[in-house]
Image (cartoon, grey):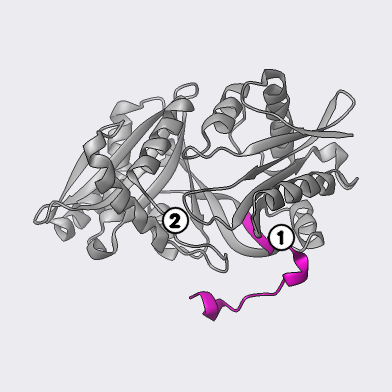
Amino acid sequence: MEIRPFGPDDHADVAAWARLVDAISDADAPWEQRETPKLGAARFRHGWDGEPETPYLLRAGDEVLGWGSIATSEYDNRDIAFLAVGVHPAHRRRGHGSALLGVLLEEARCRGRTSLVVDAWETPAGCAFAAHHGFEGRLASINRRQLLADVDRADLDRRYDDALPHAADYAFERWPAPTPDDRLADLAAMAASINDAPLDDLDYEDEVFTAARMRAYETAVAGHDRRLYRLVARHLPTGELAGQTVVVVSADDPTWGEQDDTTVTRAHRGHRLGLLLKIGMLRWLADAEPALERIDTWNAESNEHMIGVNEVLGYRVMGREWAYQRPLDRSGMRRTDRAERH
């Protein structure tokens, strides 16, 4: 058995990773978008916003049995290592996941991290693996999908018209991509409002948004060969950016889109901006992306407000994913009381 890292330019390894991930998805989350070597190379080159993970493959001879990765950030949460572990369904319960995890823990130690976070679909295998290695479920997130053919456009138009008087002091603008340099700082200040989204019991500090980070995100979207659509709400009396919604659409498969951030700043809540932004985005996409068939989104299960908006828009539940967390040093484990963090 061999475990070694690979990178975006290791084409055979990236192709093997894509085949493995699809096999894992077939067992655990068959609704997921299929991976491709192109998407994998972009993921391991750009990450979400310029800090890509380091992936590993586990091989036995010529056969790829599992994979893992570690990601760390210098933007914020510098104590955390974010891990992924996946084993081919035909080769589970043979210690391969534990072997991968051991390599990742050593790398986390080398990077000076003290807390570990790993995501996994809510499956018997995932839950058992997490419990065996001392991880505790801290945050449940729900993957939802909107099928555009099923959207009642007339109903959404009525809802939009009903909500619009509550936002009389706001204008809705289609933001250019890439963002001009002189507008990135304002965009970053607005994006920071995502920190108000619930994290339940996850021990996680606020994310730090800068102009450079916003540019890195847009560079990553372009690197994945996805088209970026950003609709913002501007407060007319002050000129402030009050909210945004962002959708990216794959150039290779324009039937598929992904909902990224939807945020409204604290000072401008209560004006139905979230609903107006998301319906406005659907109107834009209907013209700009006529082949688009579905949009995926993620929300913390406890985020009742955004879930309510998404249910109005016809999103349906696909699956639940858990963020598990534990200290690197298991001897220091304890369950932190929720009141200490909130």
Crowding around mark 1 (Cα neighbors within 10 Å: few <14, some 14 to 19, many 20+) is many
**Mark identifier at residue 241:** none
On the image, which quarter does residue 87 sit in? top right
Judging depth in this view, the residue of 290 and 204 nearest the camera is 204
Image quadrant occupied by the N terminus? top right
Residue corresponding to mark 1: 328
Q: Secondary structure at mark 1?
A: loop
Q: Label 2, on which residue?
A: 207
What residue lies at 73% left-to-right and 71% top-to-bottom? Answer: 332
Is residue 154 visible to us here? no
Q: Is residue 67 left or right of residue 289?
A: right
Q: Establish if 177 lies above or below 154.
A: above
Whether residue 229 appears in magenta in the rendering, the answer is: no
Residue 69's x, y, as percent?
68, 41
Q: Give the percent coordinates (x, y) of residue 46.
A: 51, 32
The amino acid type, in three-letter code, at marker 1 is Leu
For the residue marked with disc 2, what is the amino acid?
A: Glu
